[in-house]
Image (cartoon, rainbow, N blue to C red):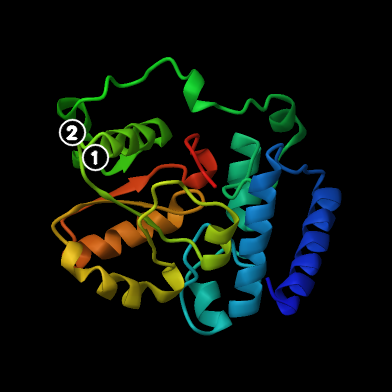
Amino acid sequence: MDNQFKKELEKTNKFVSLVYDKMNLFPNPNKEINDITAQGLTSNKLKHGSRYCPCFVVIGETREEKKKLNDRVCPCKPALEKEIPEDGICHCGIFCTSSYVDNYVKVDVSMVEHKLNLNSEKLNPLFKKDEINSVELVDLLDGRNSRLVNFILIDVREVIENDTKMIIGMDYLIPTSDLGNGLDSISDKKEENIVVHCHSGSRSAKVQEIMKSVGFKTVINLSGGIVSYGGETK
């Protein structure tokens, strides 16, 4: 992490604290989510000039184009008007209501009662879905380790996000900021089963659409992204 990023990250953390105070909101009980989101906001500030929500692909070149295309600038309108009032938490997870914090329960995949008995007959149908959840990805990774199934796991977040936390079993890091070159590098994988993920599932859903449009046959999105993932990370 270079000095420029560190200085900008300090400003982002102060900005986030001001939002907490001004809007009577609270940090996510999972500190890791707050740290990752703050780094994503900082990265977008340095790259695009504003703290765009790191959960979504920043579209457009000029500020006017970005505004016209409804890119989210933190704290964004959808979060303030819909997500936080209805869910108690914004899409990125950094802003929460007091009731959400009070009722927070961290899900541990090892405690989830429903667990697939690993066999290819039960795992292969997952590749026909548009989205899979955290438990299903854990099962697929376990199945791959047991040579029951084969697939590629791609992280489409930025390098700084991946450096902070990554899913064990990730095969490729293809940031949305360099998507064209990244997809070119795996152009020979178009017939393979592919799972994509990001922070919360929005950027990877967009990448999923793009990949399918350029000929990748099977692309599945991880619903909820790495934020909701309960398997092994590092």
In the rendered image, residue 156, in percent from the top left (x then y), is placed at 42, 61
Residue furthest to the top in view is: 113
**Residue underneath mark 2:** 125
**Secondary structure category for the residue under label 2:** helix
Q: Give the numbered dot on residue 202.
A: none
Residue 91 makes an appearance in the image: yes
Q: Nearer the viewer, residue 20 or 138?
A: 138
Q: Nearer the viewer, residue 129 or 88?
A: 129
Residue 47, quarter of the rendered image? bottom right
Q: Residues within 10 Å of mark 2 (few under 14, many from 20)?
A: few
User: What residue is at 56 percent from the left and 52 percent from the top?
Assistant: 165
What is the quadrant of the N terminus in the image?
bottom right
Residue 38, quarter of the rendered image? bottom right
Disc 2 residue type? Pro
Disc 2 versus disc 1: nearer the observer: 2
Q: Are marks 2 and 1 in contact (CB under 8 Å)?
A: yes
**Residue underneath mark 1:** 129
**Secondary structure category for the residue under label 1:** loop
